[in-house]
Image: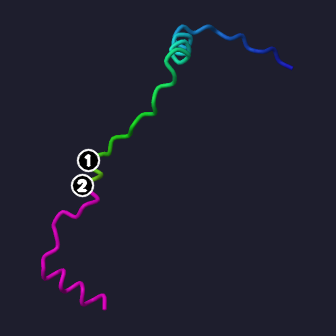
Amino acid sequence: MSKAKKQVFSKVKAVKANARARVGTPPPERVLPDPKQKLAAKPKHKLTMADLIGSKGDEE
């Protein structure tokens, strides 16, 4: 068996662990929707009345 690696003390980890113990864990991050992706999902132009009437006849 190999010798266990010695743990190096980290100030940052110690401070964060202390803060979590006192305050609690931070809330999970919220992902904001990407406006470019939202625009890509929408059609650029609305259908005209002629297109709407013509498409209904094709479905039947």
Judge whether residue 40 is colored magenta.
yes
Looking at the picture, how far across and down is residue 50, in whole percent? 13, 82
**Residue 45 in the figure: left or right of residue 23:** left
Q: Is residue 43 above or below residue 2?
A: below
Q: Residue at x 54, y 12 (%)?
A: 18
Label 2 secondary element: helix
**Crowding at label 2, few (<14), some or many (≥20) Cα neighbours within 10 Å?**
few
Q: Main secondary structure of the magenta part?
A: helix
Which color scheme does this rendered protein use? rainbow
Q: Residue at x 30, y 88 (%)?
A: 59
Position of residue 55 measured from the top left corner of the image (x, y, whole percent): 23, 84
Q: Give yes or no for contact between labels 1 and 2 (Cβ–Cβ under 8 Å).
A: yes
The amino acid marked with disc number 1 is: Pro
Say left or right for 25 vs 60.
Answer: right
Mark 1 → mark 2, Cα distance in angstroms: 6 Å
Question: Which quarter shows the C terminus?
Answer: bottom left
Q: Which sits in the foreground, 46 or 1?
A: 46
Question: Which span is picked out in magenta?
Answer: 39-60
Q: Residue furthest right?
A: 1
Where the N terminus falls, by quadrant? top right
Name the residue tied to disc 2.
39
Disc sitting over residue 35 in the figure: 1
